[in-house]
């Protein structure tokens, strides 16, 4: 059965906090996974995310806030699984541009990582001095993969040619991607575990305006198993929050996406982790 976004609000918040004119934040679901190369199913991520959100407490202890009161407008789904990746990217670009013109804080839930290509294009037109904070197990820097330049394995290649790209949590890549890495801007997990100053160093490399893209597989699979390409040795919850909170404090975060949630019927903890992460980031932005 098709999921009806028009009848939903994020976390079941009252409709008065979910109207566009009253909302500081726009949430755009992109249920698309055509380019996924191992396990498909991240097109179901937005629905699982919204289902899990209904069971989340709306008071955030750490920030002593109820950020939903600043308003979260849920956009109806803009894609179908049958369109081409190029068409999907154009739709994401167009809708991002639409809500940027309304001066909203724009967020996304995917879907595979290819959704970021369109949104980054639009943010790059809006903001000068933009950098991309990419948190992922993989570099995603292939120029083309399996004949497709829009594959999720290529999602950061275009951005790497235009903006400072700070990559966090990397622990898997093809040797061909080495030549596309921005020297000094990549923080491998094996180095993070040995370097107590990595957070400070990474934030120093970010420019004034930052777009954050988070692949759920940046987390260790022991806490986030439901993702398309899990890799051992990832980040844990409080380390991730500590870093992201500092980013929001030190830089102007202009938007973010969370991608590659691949729900399964046997466990829902990753769905809930994704929702909590999303709400934490809104709390860091608006309080």
Image (cartoon, rainbow, N blue to C red):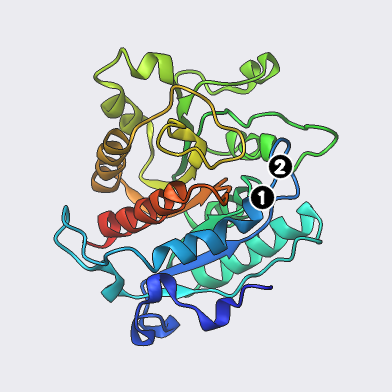
Q: What residue sits 39% from the left and 69% below the top?
A: 54
Q: Residue 19: give x, y in percent of width and height.
A: 42, 84
Q: Which residue corresponds to the image point at 62% horizontal and 73% vertical from the top-left? A: 3
Q: Is residue 104 visible?
A: no
Q: Secondary structure at mark 1?
A: loop
N-terminal of the two: label 1 or label 2? Answer: 2
Residue holding disc 1: 41
Asked if disc 1 and disc 2 are in contact, CB closer than 8 Å, the reply is yes
The residue furthest front is: 266
The one of 183 and 240 positioned closer to us in this rendering:
240
Q: Would residue 176 be found to the left or right of residue 192 on screen? A: right
In the displayed structure, would residue 56 be above or below residue 128?
below
Q: State whether residue 252 appears in this view.
A: yes
- Label count reads 2
Query: Which quarter of the figure has residue 5?
Result: bottom right
Task: Tell me the quarter of the image containing the C terminus.
Answer: bottom left
Element on which disc 2 rests: loop
Q: Residue furthest bottom?
A: 16
Mark 1–mark 2 Cα distance, whole angstroms, equals 8 Å
Image position, residue 232 (x, y; %) = 49, 23
Name which quarter of the figure residue 235 lies in. Answer: top left
Q: Is residue 235 above or below residue 45?
A: above
Residue 118 in the image: state x and y as whole percent.
Answer: 64, 54
Q: Which residue is mark 2?
A: 36
């Amino acid at each position: 059965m098709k999921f009806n976004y028009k009848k939903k609000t994020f976390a079941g918040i009252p409709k008065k906090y979910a109207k566009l004119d009253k909302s500081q934040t726009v949430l755009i679901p992109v249920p698309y996974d055509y380019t996924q190369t191992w396990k498909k199913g991240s097109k179901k991520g937005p629905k699982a995310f919204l289902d899990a959100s209904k069971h989340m407490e709306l008071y955030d202890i750490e920030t002593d806030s109820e950020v939903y009161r600043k308003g979260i407008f849920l956009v109806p789904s803009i894609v179908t699984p049958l369109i081409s990746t190029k068409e999907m990217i154009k739709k994401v670009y167009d809708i991002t541009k639409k809500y940027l013109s309304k001066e909203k804080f724009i967020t996304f839930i995917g879907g595979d990582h290819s959704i970021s290509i369109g949104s980054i294009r639009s943010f790059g037109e809006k903001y000068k001095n933009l950098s991309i904070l990419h948190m992922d197990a993989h570099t995603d820097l292939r120029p083309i993969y399996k004949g497709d330049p829009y594959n999720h394995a290529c999602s950061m290649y275009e951005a790497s040619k235009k903006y400072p790209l700070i990559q966090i949590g990397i622990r898997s890549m093809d040797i061909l991607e080495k030549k596309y890495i921005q020297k000094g801007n990549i923080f491998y997990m094996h180095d993070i575990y040995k370097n107590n100053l990595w957070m400070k160093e990474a934030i120093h490399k970010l420019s004034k305006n930052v777009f954050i893209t988070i692949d759920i597989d940046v987390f260790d699979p022991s806490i986030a198993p439901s993702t398309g390409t899990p890799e051992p040795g990832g980040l844990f919850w409080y380390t991730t929050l500590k870093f992201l909170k500092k980013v929001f404090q030190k830089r102007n975060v202009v938007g973010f996406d969370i991608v590659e949630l691949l729900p399964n019927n046997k466990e829902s903890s990753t769905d809930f982790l994704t929702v909590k992460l999303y709400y934490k980031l809104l709390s860091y932005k608006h309080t």
